[in-house]
């Protein structure tokens, strides 16, 4: 039986590791590397155990840890249920290859990289686990503070310029977040999300609109984090400028905003529809349109990757905006597959960017537009590809298939699950309920087509007809993270049935919030403290 105390481990492990490493100078890179990798491997193990526990059917539907051993709702509670533990596992599985990739060259590009990385994990994991609005704000700020340092890691004018924009936007969003918390507390008298949901059902008079405005302000702050247009204009410049492993782990930051929005929206229902569902769908659809245009216009792989993150956010917002358990399950499948694929994509882009300068892209675009390029010499055709090029080319091709949504990889399975469930309840062609699924279907097809055009163009320009000979110096520590994430995507295809069962169970819990509420209110302080420990 897994003890409930394990719920706090995903916060304590990186917090203790990051703080301990501050006592050592950066030149102690070997020690810091070992400690950081041990911390993240521990997170993978803990997250796996928590996922197994909450899906085993033994005991309550969630593990609730009461900080300070105070009773609910006085205690600050950490709730490990299906959605939060799933997000913990995805974060750990992405953090491990990102950290390993960074140990080859990026860890020495600036001070305190390993500690900042661990503190970022503290904020992300805490945001997934907390059941308290104020501590959600605290963990958001820990996450953002660490991300400010990581975004600037490596220096350079582009990082400073985009970093200033990133910091400014998120500071304003944090202010909106704090004001929203104050309004929710004024209306409900509580910051515990379960308690707020319970009191909202019987709220009357002026308190009800105050609560709605407060939650709307929280939703606005979460949408900034998720990158919804026009609130997400900071995302593409920031992610394009970040170092490769930093951009890879930053993929999770937008997912934290979506998680917080989904958690709060489904805890405060309105006539069976998630709070803000229509706004989520419309905003997500517009975000997809902007991302499609951005992907088509992108001339660098890293900028295209940033727009693919924006496209992922738009897809998830529009899918969750349909507010159906079946489509939510497909959206969770898409969340996992796109997160892993984009992480590996940024690794490959980072390696390729070292082998080319900015002028290469300009020459390639000019050659495509005006046909000034000379044909490849006949003796060059059939020359053997070095091993590094082969790994990058195959990896790029597989990741492109996932991002585009081609069968049989997870991107296709996720989109198929979304569309199948979206059109499932509709019986007539003139049913008004068909409008939003039809819009989503059209945008998914357009996004796949845009990805096909852009990634095909970039793949040909990089691997098939490069402006300059491509001979990347890729090491084992850079190859292993790419192969690790590709292996996870293949496993996701092979085990698509069990994975979809997990996503369906998670979606059912989300759309039946009584399971979350029952688990929180059933939690009791530890007997030793209650029976005289104090």
Image (cartoon, rainbow, N blue to C red):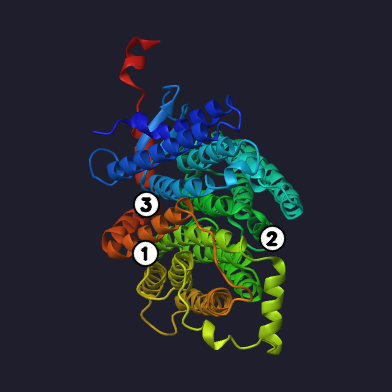
Q: Is residue 62 visible?
A: no
Q: Which numbered marker is on residue 512?
A: 3
Task: Give coordinates of residue 33: x percent, y percent.
Answer: 49, 37
| Foreground pick, 498 / 452 | 452
Task: Give coordinates of residue 362: x percent, y percent.
Answer: 71, 75
Report the residue at 54% width, 54% height from top. 248
| Foreground pick, 356 / 508 | 356
* Disc 1 + disc 3, Cβ < 8 Å: no
* Disc 1 + disc 2, Cβ < 8 Å: no
Q: Which numbered marker is on residue 233?
A: 2
Report the residue at 45% width, 56% height from top. 479
Q: Which numbered marker is on residue 68?
A: none
Comes first in the chain, label 1 or label 3: 1
Q: Is residue 133 above or below residue 289?
A: above
Residue indicated by mark 1: 326
What's the CA distance linking mark 1 and mark 2? 31 Å
Task: Give coordinates of residue 532: x percent, y percent.
Answer: 35, 10
Which quadrant does the N terminus fall into?
A: top left
Q: Is residue 526 visible?
A: yes
Comes first in the chain, label 1 or label 2: 2
What's the CA distance linking mark 3 and mark 2? 34 Å
């Amino acid at each position: 039986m897994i003890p409930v105390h394990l719920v706090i481990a995903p916060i304590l492990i990186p917090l203790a590791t990051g703080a301990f490493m501050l006592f050592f100078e950066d030149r102690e890179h070997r020690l810091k590397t070992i400690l950081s990798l041990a911390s993240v491997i521990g997170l993978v193990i803990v997250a796996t155990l928590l996922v197994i526990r909450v899906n085993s059917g033994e005991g309550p539907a969630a593990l609730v840890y009461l900080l300070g051993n105070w009773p609910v709702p006085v205690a600050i509670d950490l709730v490990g249920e299906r959605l939060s533990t799933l997000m913990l596992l995805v974060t750990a599985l992405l953090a491990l290859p990102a950290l390993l990739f960074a140990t080859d060259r990026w860890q020495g590009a600036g001070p305190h990289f390993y500690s900042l990385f661990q503190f970022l994990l503290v904020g992300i994991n805490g945001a997934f686990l907390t059941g308290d609005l104020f501590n959600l704000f605290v963990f958001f700020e820990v996450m953002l503070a660490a991300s400010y340092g990581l975004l600037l890691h490596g220096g350079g004018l582009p990082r400073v310029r985009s970093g200033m924009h990133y910091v400014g936007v998120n500071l304003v969003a944090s202010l909106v977040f704090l004001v929203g918390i104050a309004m929710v507390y004024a209306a409900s008298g509580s910051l515990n999300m379960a308690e707020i949901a319970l009191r909202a059902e019987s709220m009357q008079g002026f308190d009800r609109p105050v609560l709605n405005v407060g939650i709307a302000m929280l939703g606005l702050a979460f949408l900034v984090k998720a990158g919804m247009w026009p609130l997400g204009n900071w995302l593409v410049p920031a992610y394009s400028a970040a170092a490769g492993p930093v951009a890879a782990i930053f993929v999770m930051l937008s997912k934290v905003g979506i998680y917080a929005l989904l958690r709060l929206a489904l805890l405060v229902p309105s006539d069976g529809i998630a709070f803000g569902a229509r706004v989520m769908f419309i905003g997500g659809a517009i975000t997809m349109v902007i991302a499609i245009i951005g992907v088509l216009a992108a001339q660098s792989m890293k900028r295209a990757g940033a727009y693919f993150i924006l496209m992922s956010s738009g897809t998830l917002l529009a899918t969750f905006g349909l507010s159906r358990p079946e489509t939510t399950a497909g959206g969770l499948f898409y969340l996992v597959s796109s997160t892993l694929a984009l992480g590996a994509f940024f690794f490959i882009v980072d390696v390729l960017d070292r082998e080319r300068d900015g002028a290469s892209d300009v020459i390639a675009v000019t050659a495509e537009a005006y046909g000034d390029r000379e044909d490849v010499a006949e003796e060059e055709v059939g020359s053997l590809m070095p091993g590094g090029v082969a790994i990058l080319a195959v990896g790029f091709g597989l990741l492109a298939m996932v991002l585009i949504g081609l069968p049989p990889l997870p991107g296709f399975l996720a989109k198929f699950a979304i569309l199948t469930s979206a059109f499932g309840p509709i019986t007539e062609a003139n049913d008004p309920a068909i409008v939003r699924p039809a819009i989503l279907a059209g945008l998914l097809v357009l996004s796949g087509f845009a990805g096909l055009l852009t990634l095909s163009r970039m793949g040909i320009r990089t691997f098939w007809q490069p402006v300059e000979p491509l001979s990347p110096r890729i090491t084992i520590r850079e190859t292993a993270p790419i192969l690790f994430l590709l292996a996870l995507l293949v496993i996701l295809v092979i085990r698509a049935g069990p994975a979809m069962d997990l996503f369906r169970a998670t979606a059912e819990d989300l759309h039946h919030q009584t399971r979350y509420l029952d688990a929180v209110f059933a939690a009791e302080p530890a007997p030793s403290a209650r029976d005289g420990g104090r």
